[in-house]
Amino acid sequence: MGHERMTRGDALASVGGEFYGVVEDTAKALYIRALTDVPPDVRAALAGAYARERSTVARQLLGIVLRNIEIADERRTLVCQDTGTPIYYVSLGTGVSLDGARVAEAIRRGTERATREYPLRSSVCHPVTRENPQTNTGYRIPAIYWEFVPDADWLEILCVPKGSGSESMTFLKMLPPADGVAGVRRFVLESVVEAGGNPCPPCIVGVGVGGSADLCVALAKRASIRPIGTRNSDPHLAALEEDLFSSINQLGIGPQGLGGDTTALAVHIEHAYTHITHNPVAVNMQCWRGLRASARVHADGRTEISV
Ligand code: SF4
């Protein structure tokens, strides 16, 4: 047993102190990148929607969105003024040995530095006193979620500065199992209608199905940041994604809620097994900006950033 543990320990790639400095620099770079760049899949989906849109007003609005992105590219400036609530998903390879508390602290410092040095508006405040530390950080913020990847010797960081317009439009319902898929479908459509123009459509509609109440909402958010063009690996849920995408785009809400064919750029579902008496469903939306940027940091400090 002891020998086995030692062998496994030897296989781990240990990181030195400078690794945490690289993580801090990476967190800073990702926060700025997510606010100043738009992922290629989101750009392609917006361009495709512009080409297909039949409403004159909606087409004009999509044209403005595309021009807005061009201007942000030319001037290397923010795509939108909202710096969001900083959220990081850290995927930790099980083949790399590091101190998670130091990684979390490095990410917090990187977020603060991005805010101070870029500089960025601080969108984060105390929930009761409304005191704003001007750092985009505070108690439990940035929110950091940990995931583990077998046999990988790297760390992946995905930064999602969640805009308030889309985050405000988050919905959860603990449906009974008897409501079935029809109940899930109805709740998603009702949520999109209730959200209207508030989440800055066209959106990536994230849907969580199953789990517990908190897990269901977390799944909906995870779904909303999946790249456009990806499908749930479960064929039942992949079919529901396509069905909801088509139904949502027949609602006529359109870009910024002013009518048109393009309400959703995509619908993504993430799921988990659930209690036999539950049928939870949650909706969390990502606005047209598709805010996200990610990086892979190798044990030797090499870093690759992408959006
Ligand atoms: S929801 Fe998105 S596009 Fe709308 S204001 Fe917030 S960050 Fe900007």
Image (spheres, rainbow, N blue to C red):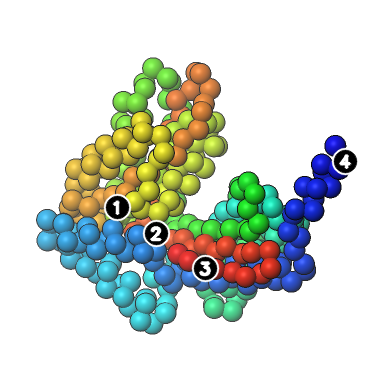
Residue at label 4?
2
First in sequence: mark 4 or mark 2? 4
Q: Residue furthest right?
A: 2
Spatial CA span between label 2 and label 1? 10 Å
**Helix, strand or loop at disc 2?**
loop
Whether label 4 lies within 8 Å of ligand 1 gets the answer no
Closer to us: mark 4 or mark 2?
4
Q: Residue at x 42, y 77 (%)?
A: 77
Mark with earlier residue (3, 2): 2
Ligand 1 under 8 Å from disc 2 Cβ: no
Give the side of residue 179 with respect to residue 262, left or right. Answer: right
The reply to whether the C-beta atoms of the residues labelled 3 and 4 are less than 8 Å apart is: no
From the image, tell me which residue sits under label 2.
290
Nearer the observer: mark 3 or 4; the answer is 4
Q: 12 or 30, which lies in front?
A: 12
Q: What whole-number distance in Å separates the C-alpha atoms at marks 3 and 4? A: 39 Å
Q: Is residue 225 left or right of residue 16?
A: left
Secondary structure at badge 1 equals strand
Task: Please give the residue where the numbered disc 1 appears in the rendered image.
Answer: 265
Q: Is residue 78 visible?
A: yes
SS label for mark 4: helix
Alpha carbon distance from label 3 to label 2:
16 Å
Q: Which mark is residue 305?
A: 3
Give, as a three-letter code, the residue at label 3: Ile
Q: Is mark 1 within 8 Å of ligand 1?
A: no
Judged left or right of residue 59, residue 105 is: right
Q: Residues within 10 Å of mark 3 (few under 14, many from 20)?
A: some
Q: Mark 1 and mark 3: span between their CA atoms?
A: 24 Å
Q: Nearer the viewer, residue 3 or 202?
A: 3
Q: Are marks 2 and 1 in contact (CB under 8 Å)?
A: yes
Q: Earlier in the sequence, mark 2 or mark 1?
A: 1
